[in-house]
Image (tube, rainbow, N blue to C red):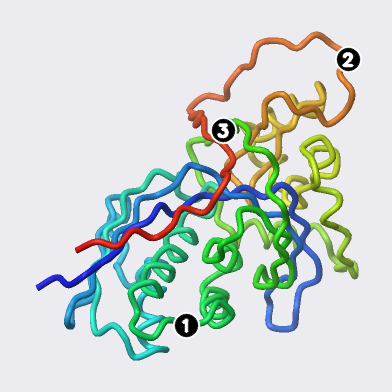
Amino acid sequence: MIGRGGRTLAQAKINLSLRVLDREPDGFHSIETVFLRLDLGDDVRLHIRAKTRTLRCGVMRDQPQTENLAYRAAALFADETGWPGGFEIVIKKRIPVGGGLGGGSADAAAVLRILNTLSPNPLKTDALLELAGRLGSDVPFLASDFVMALGWGRGEKLLRLAPLPSRDVQLFYPPFGIDTGEAYALLDASRRPMPHAVPELTAEMFGDWESAARRSVNDFEAVIRPRWPAIDALMARGERYGLFYRLSGSGSTVFKVPGIRTRLAGGPELPRLQVPEGTKIIVTRTAESVVPVELLD
């Protein structure tokens, strides 16, 4: 019999800026980034069960449920806290898969937040975010109550930032994803010998949209653009006309914040946008708040 449960919206994120620093001895990279939540999200529901552990998600296809990051989050919570004995997770996907928008991480973070809300002995925030950090670099931010944050280390170190005023965002999702491991391998290959990089991003750089656009960078773009023309076409448009286009994460999604310029207006007349073949456009907004967990019977 299914017990009590909860649901929430697993909100996607974009990276207003993303720098990849040194590769650590364990093979992982240090990063510094500015995370910002979106209104776009996956619907995640979880019910407590006595013993059985199950997950249903329409886009999993032949993937074993135990490999899904949301399942792994629930199993980790249960193994670390001794509760619950079982769970049933149902995910309705809206965030594109493999698009650099944190979809899998958002689902995992939502599961952690739901379980911690339902738990008879909830974890303190630091302990919950420590669990989140074991699952991936985006998960701590998405498990937090921050709308916008400066992140560094492997993403587990977070500084809350005052969220920028909510604006429309256009997401350009090409008909392919980019594997994060492949993106890091391309970046490593392009950087040999690896330079010693130091953090440069500050909260003041992202105090308003115009400053954020001028300061925005993504280290992956240099190695992603030459290999994927659809991404390069969008980024080139932004560069030529001073429009705020940026790759989110390691791609493949390119986002645009309409009405924000990376430099003073002027130059060539803006032609009509030619959307690369097969690219989907998703219109959403930057979030004003973190969607809370709703309790279910």
- Judged left or right of residue 284, residue 61 is left
State the quadrant of the C terminus. bottom left
Report helix, strand or loop for mark 3. strand
Q: How busy is the neighbourhood of tag 2: few (under 14 within 10 Å), some, or many (20 plus)?
A: few
Q: Is residue 100 at least partly visible in the picture?
A: no
Answer above or below: position of 105 versus 25.
Answer: above
* Precedes in sequence: disc 1 or disc 2: 1
Nearer to us in this view, 200 or 279: 200
| Residue at the image point whose x is 73% and y is 65% from the top | 159
Report helix, strand or loop for mark 2. loop
Image position, residue 140 (x, y; %): 58, 68
* Precedes in sequence: disc 3 or disc 1: 1
Type of amino acid at the residue the image marks with label 1: Leu
User: Residue 164's image quarter?
Assistant: top right
Image position, residue 168 (x, y; %): 59, 30
State the quadrant of the N terminus. bottom left
- In 3D space, how far apart are the residues under numbered discs 3 and 2 (Cα atoms)? 25 Å
Type of amino acid at the residue the image marks with label 2: Gly
The mark lying in front, picked from 3 and 2, is 2
Q: Where is mark 2, residue-wise?
A: 266
Type of amino acid at the residue the image marks with label 3: Phe
Image position, residue 246 (x, y; %): 70, 39
Q: Where is mark 1, residue-wise?
A: 123
The mark lying in front, picked from 3 and 1, is 1
Q: Where is mark 3, residue-wise?
A: 172
Count of marks placed on residues:
3
The mark lying in front, picked from 1 and 2, is 1
Image position, residue 163 (x, y; %): 68, 48
